[in-house]
Amino acid sequence: MSLHHAELENVVATFANHLRPRGSLFMYEFSWDAYDGRAAAWLAKDDQSAADNSVLGWWREHRELHTSAAIKKALYTHFEPVLEIRRPYLARMLGRHDLEATEHALIDTQLLPALGFWIIAMRAKTQ
């Protein structure tokens, strides 16, 4: 949950250098750029903070972070994807683990975007 802040090329290369060829990387990351009106509406019901959870407010707050596409592009220069899984993020962001199953069900039915994702990847042989 920090690659969206990191110097991607340096960090991902360091990960690769610390693993043996075919070594596995397990990662949970944040896809802030998947946030849309459905996510804003969901947060409006459950977020008790004064945060601006509008789509525009969300994009203003996160626009300096790396997108999920940029993270995957950097990762897959050194690693081969094994598995990508869309996961909940909003319930965890709120500290409301009781809402995670509901969020996951809404993601599965495409009523809510998945802002979290897991990646399992293997270090490329050519490193």
Image: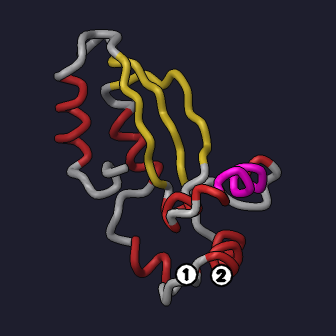
Q: Give the residue type that dot 2 points to.
A: Ala
- Image spot of residue 16 (x, y percent): 24, 25
Q: Is residue 41 left or right of residue 47?
A: right
- The quadrant of the rendering that contains the C terminus is top left
Work out how far the residue at label 2 is from the one at label 1, CA to CA, in angstroms.
7 Å
From the viewer's perspective, is 32 left or right of 62?
right
Image label count: 2
Q: Residue furthest front?
A: 98
Seen at 17% across and 22% down, the residue is: 17
Q: Position of residue 82 (x, y in %)?
A: 51, 21
Q: Residue at x 55, y 26 (%)?
A: 83
- The residue that label 2 is drawn on is 44
Judged from this view, the residue extending furthest toward the right is: 109
Q: Nearer the viewer, residue 56 or 93?
A: 93
Q: If you read the primary sequence from the N terminus, does the residue marked by circle 2 or circle 1 appear first?
A: 2
User: Is residue 39 a member of the stretch shown in magenta?
Assistant: no
Q: Nearer the viewer, mark 2 or mark 1?
A: 2
Specify whether 15 is left or right of 122. Answer: left
Residue 53 numbered mark, or none: 1
Give left or right: position of 121 versus 45: left
Which residue is located at x 69 percent, y 57 percent?
A: 103
Residue extent of the magenta highlight: 100-106
State the image quarter where residue 122 is shown.
top left
Res. 56 in view = no
- Tell me residue 10's x, y (percent): 17, 41
* Residue nearest the viewer, comparing 114 with 78: 114
Secondary-structure class at tag 1? loop
Would residue 65 be seen by someone viewing this image from the given angle? yes
Amino acid tagged 1: Asn
